[in-house]
Amino acid sequence: MLGARTSLRVIRGRRLSLGWPNMQRLRMISLWIAVIGILGTLSASVATQWLQTRAADRRSLAEEHRRISDLRREALAEFADTLMSYRRAQLHNWHEARAQGVDADQTAVAAELRELRARAWSAMYRVQLLWREKAVVAGAAGLVDAVTKLKALEDKHALGKSADQVREDLSALMDRAREESLLGSVK
């Protein structure tokens, strides 16, 4: 039986004596293999961590877009509901004022009308907070002003035409806001 120094080993088809220089070489090869393995594992774990962090960031960004989109829809629905209630009350107040022969601000529903106007402005400000697009915000403010101006009209035909125009403008605003919201979520 041969000793450790005199034993022979076959590496790549060659017989080598495992004396001191060859043992040192094998140890260095083993060391480099271990270093490469450790670096590979380390780089894989860093890459995995980076990919997971990136995926989590994308998920949170998508969730934030979804949340803002939901808030926008709620704000727009509230604005439309409040504006139409204000419009309805403004029309009722106009007819009541003409029937009683008094100014529109002196009717029994004038206090309720002021409350509805305040709610309409509040809903418009919520829309303003959630939309960057100035056209949507300006359209909402213009609609509140248009409903407020209904009380100053003298003619019943002009009142009906203006009230219908408010409804059409609100529908157009809703369509525009929906398009802007969808385009904003794609960006």
Image (cartoon, grey):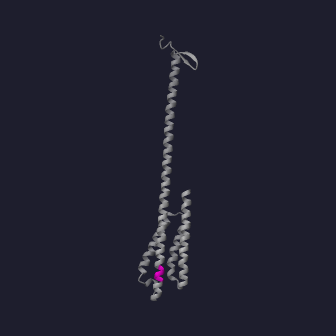
140 w.r.t. 11: above or below: below
Residue found farthest to the top = 1
- Quarter of the C terminus within the rendering: bottom right
Q: Please name the residue shown 46% across and 85% down the image.
A: 97
Q: Please name the residue shown 53% across and 75% down the image.
A: 166
84 w.r.t. 6: above or below: below
Residue found farthest to the right = 13
* Residue 183 percent location from the top left of the image: 56, 60
Q: Please name the residue shown 51% across and 34% down the image.
A: 40
Asked whether residue 117 is drawn in magenta, I would say no
Region rendered in magenta: 90-94
* Residue 53 percent location from the top left of the image: 48, 46
Main secondary structure along the magenta-highlighted residues: helix
Q: Please name the residue shown 45% across and 85% down the image.
A: 96
Count of marks, rendered view: 0
53 w.r.t. 135: above or below: above
* Residue 9 percent location from the top left of the image: 53, 16
* Residue 35 percent location from the top left of the image: 50, 30
Q: Nearer the viewer, residue 67 or 20?
A: 67
Q: Nearer the viewer, residue 77 or 152?
A: 77
61 w.r.t. 162: above or below: above
